[in-house]
């Protein structure tokens, strides 16, 4: 049986990630290679230095090639699906319609109204289309129809959610990748990719919020009644927490990042049990000092409560919070922050948990599986869009040429 191979690239604020997956018809997707290196030339999920971003892409490709050689193989990656995040990602409800003139709705009518929706979504000017998620149909004034076939009326309407991103930001990523001789293919939204990896059918049906907590931004995706009903990105991420630690304690950026990863928590630590974090002279600028764990947790808690308040306000404005019966699923590097699930439960009043990728094998054995959700989901999304694009040997000439 022939295999199809996919590659995905994310040039994130904190990390540049390249993943390669292999799939056979009817079989589970398998992650065959994965590399993640610190990003350069990226701030708040946007490229600010093309040359530095290009070097990050070269480095992550080189890491994949190094791993392949260590395993006795040899690959040269030529193209990959682009995974994006950032506050320029937005979702807009659209509606298309077609006349049916009092007769029964046919499959041709459904195809026509779907094509009309795609044409409307295509007229986006400076925006690139990431996804067109069908919501429901309406026949005349009867709304909320899931399957309109056979129904009669004068007009058939289709509601969709159009997910878009700034074309210029995508072009910047393509320019950076071109410099590393890597062709970028369809752009994919990081958070809906992560959702594809961590959610099950029950959660999508009964209402769930996925949060993809990155370095420069936090992506969100809401599913209800088995469809994507809202998505976007908020310009607050893990780097903001690091910068807060820098300013609160007058520490170097690199040390603040280490402290965040090793010691930070989202809830405020108890006075008596908190204690202090001792910093070595070499790391803190030449003198031995310590910082209060409680003070650290106060700083981190303030930033995370700000982010959750933004999320809550958005959900309430869209009347979505009460529909999240399956709560919140956390993905990305920020999901590692201790007690974040507890804080979200306190602030939103719904359960929260760490997302674990499903329907894909070969993931590294790691204490933080949420780190791989976006890459895993991007591979699954690529397969869904192009299920049998190439045989394994044809792909070796394309992706691995």
Image (cartoon, rainbow, N blue to C red):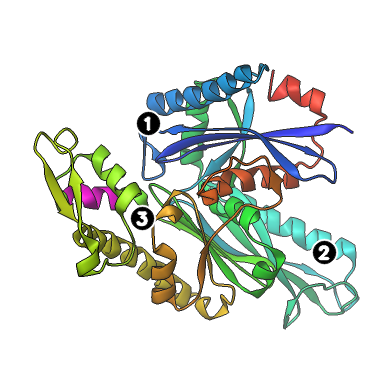
Residue 289: where, in percent of width, then height? 11, 45
Q: Quadrant of residue 310?
A: bottom left
Identify the residue under disc 1: 40
Q: CA distance from mark 3 to mark 2?
A: 40 Å
Q: Which residues are magenta?
A: 241-247
Judged left or right of residue 212, residue 33 is right
Q: Residues within 10 Å of mark 2 (few under 14, many from 20)?
A: many
Q: Residues within 10 Å of mark 1 (few under 14, many from 20)?
A: many
Answer whether labels 1 and 3 touch (C-beta < 8 Å): no
Judged left or right of residue 74, residue 296 is left
Q: CA distance from mark 1 to mark 2?
A: 47 Å
Identify the residue under disc 3: 236
Q: Secondary structure at mark 3?
A: loop
Residue 217: where, in percent of width, then height? 40, 51
Residue 263: where, in percent of width, then height? 30, 52
Closer to the observer: label 1 or label 2? 1
Identify the residue under disc 2: 110
Residue located at (36% from left, 50% from top): 238
Majority secondary structure of the magenta segment?
helix
Viewer-proximal residue among 43 and 156:
43
Q: Secondary structure at mark 1?
A: loop
Residue located at (41% from left, 33% from top): 38
Residue located at (27% from left, 66% from top): 269
Q: Residues within 10 Å of mark 3 (few under 14, many from 20)?
A: many
Q: CA distance from mark 1 to mark 3?
A: 19 Å
Viewer-proximal residue among 373 and 134:
373
Residue 123 appears in the figure: no
Task: Report the quarter where the C terminus lies.
Answer: top right
Judged left or right of residue 310, residue 108 is right
Task: Report the quarter where the N terminus lies.
Answer: top right
Disc on the earlier residue, 3 or 2: 2
């Amino acid at each position: 049986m022939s295999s199809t191979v996919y590659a995905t690239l994310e040039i994130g604020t904190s990390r540049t990630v390249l993943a390669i997956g292999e799939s056979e018809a009817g079989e589970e997707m398998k992650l065959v290679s994965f590399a993640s290196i610190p990003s350069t030339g990226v701030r708040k999920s946007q490229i600010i230095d093309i040359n530095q971003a290009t070097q990050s892409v070269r480095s992550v490709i080189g890491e994949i090639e190094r791993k392949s050689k260590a395993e006795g193989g040899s690959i040269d990656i030529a193209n990959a699906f682009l995974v994006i995040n950032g506050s320029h990602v937005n979702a807009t409800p659209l509606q298309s319609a077609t006349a049916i003139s009092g007769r029964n709705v046919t499959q041709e009518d459904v195809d026509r109204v779907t094509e009309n929706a795609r044409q409307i979504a295509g007229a986006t000017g400076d925006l690139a289309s990431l996804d067109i998620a069908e919501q429901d149909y309406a026949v005349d004034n009867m709304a909320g129809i899931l399957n309109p076939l056979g129904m009669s009326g004068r007009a058939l309407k289709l509601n969709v959610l159009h997910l878009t991103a700034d074309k210029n930001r995508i072009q910047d990523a393509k320019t950076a990748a071109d410099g590393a001789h890597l062709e970028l293919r369809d752009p994919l939204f990081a958070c809906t990719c992560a959702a594809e990896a961590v959610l099950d059918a029950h959660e999508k049906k009964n209402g769930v919020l996925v949060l993809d907590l990155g370095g420069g931004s936090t992506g969100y995706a809401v599913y209800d009644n088995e469809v994507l009903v809202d998505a976007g990105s908020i310009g607050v991420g893990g780097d903001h927490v690091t910068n807060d630690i820098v300013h609160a304690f007058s520490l170097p950026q690199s040390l603040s990042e280490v402290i965040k990863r090793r010691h930070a928590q989202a809830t405020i630590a108890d006075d008596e049990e908190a204690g202090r974090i001792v910093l070595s002279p070499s790391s803190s600028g030449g003198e031995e000092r310590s910082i209060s764990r409680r003070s650290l947790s106060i700083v981190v808690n303030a930033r995370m409560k700000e982010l959750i308040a933004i999320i809550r306000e958005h959900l309430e404005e869209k009347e979505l919070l009460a529909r999240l019966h399956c709560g919140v699923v956390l993905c990305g590097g920020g999901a590692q922050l201790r007690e974040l699930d507890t804080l979200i439960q306190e602030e939103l009043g719904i359960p929260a948990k760490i997302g674990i990728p499903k329907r894909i094998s070969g993931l590294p054995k790691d204490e933080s599986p949420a780190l791989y959700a976006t890459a895993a989901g991007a591979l699954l999304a690529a397969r869904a869009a192009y299920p049998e694009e190439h045989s394994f040997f044809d792909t070796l000439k394309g992706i691995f040429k």
